[in-house]
Image (cartoon, rainbow, N blue to C red):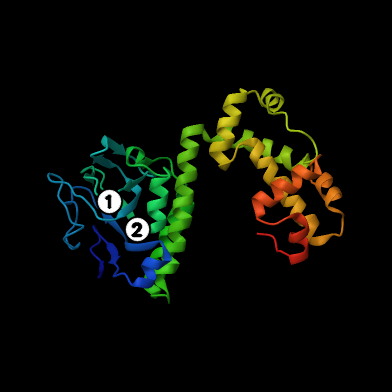
Amino acid sequence: MEAEIGHKQNPRLYRYFPLSKRDQAWGLFVTTVGETLIGSHLPYPPEGHPKGYAFDWARGRVLHDHQVVYISRGRGWLETARMPRQTLEAGSVFLLFPGVWHRYRPMPDTGWEEHWIGFGGAQVRRWTKEGFFAAQHAVIYPAPEAALRGLFTRALEAVQANQPALQQVLAGILGDMMGLLYSAQQARFTGLRESTSAIQQVVEHMQSNLLTKLDLPVMAGRLGVSYSWLRRTFQQHTGLSPHQYLLELRLIRARNLLAHDTLPVKRVAREAGFEDEHYFSRLFRRKTGVTPTEWRSRGTPLP
């Protein structure tokens, strides 16, 4: 179902999608995509949406899929069964979860412009199960607006062009979008400017000093932060502890040497920052499933 309405006070473009077995097997699929400009003092939500998506403020709504909604202009409110009423400013994003009652609308005197994508699939269930996104923290603000607006534009352009394998194209765009939102969410928890700068300096230090031991307390002192804050924030940014991150950098260096050189394994271990050849070989096998010698003989490409 698709609608494009040219009313100058309420232009809309939206579409709802049937799903094939191929779409569901992909693991991430899109159920709806659209945008609406609501002028001031106009009724909300506008008419025309299917019964499962239409709602009124008094009763609210419960969806069967997830949605990400981006407000690019205006102001409004959001209320869910998991959160008290929140004021939404331009630039905010909120997530809607299946089975969770909610309602939202623009303020009458400002109206708003909203953009949305509905989605589901096995990948989404993994995101929620692992706690990447939660109904208790549904509002993400500030969001990376320029990139986010570009992704919504790409999605609508793909829909209008009716590209082959449209669902898979939209799933790729959605994956980029959710990655940006997760990054913005982590920045909110850690403080964007100071944390990004500190973590970048630690990563650059690791990359330039693979052969030396990482002294994180000393690094924290140089950066003017506590050791516990630096360790916690580093893991929130990268998904790895500083020690694990350094080990992964060293393993990448070792795989490069094994793939492009004839150095003995003992020398490879040393050149990658591992003092103990036997520890290096055990770690390499645990991480890759093969020994360094087997890796080299197979000519395994870098991941």
Query: Which residue does the numbered mark 1 point to in the structure image?
Result: 98
Circle 1 SS class: loop
Question: How far across and how far down the image is residue 205, in percent?
Answer: 73, 37
Q: Is residue 30 left or right of residue 197?
A: left
Q: Are marks 1 and 2 in contact (CB under 8 Å)?
A: yes
Q: Residue at x 79, y 42 (%)?
A: 274
- The mark that comes first in sequence, 1 or 2, is 1
Element under disc 2: strand
- Residue 148 position, x and y percent, is 45, 53
Position of the C terminus by quadrant: bottom right
Which residue lies at the image location 30% right of the left edge and 48% below the top edge? 96
The residue singled out by tag 2 in the image is: 120
Is residue 18 found left or right of 157 in the rendered image?
A: left
Residue depicted at x 50% and y 38%: 187
Q: Residues within 10 Å of mark 1 (few under 14, many from 20)?
A: few
Amino acid found under the numbered disc labelled 2: Gly
- Spatial distance from mark 1 to mark 2, Cα to Cα? 9 Å
Amino acid type shown at disc 1: Pro
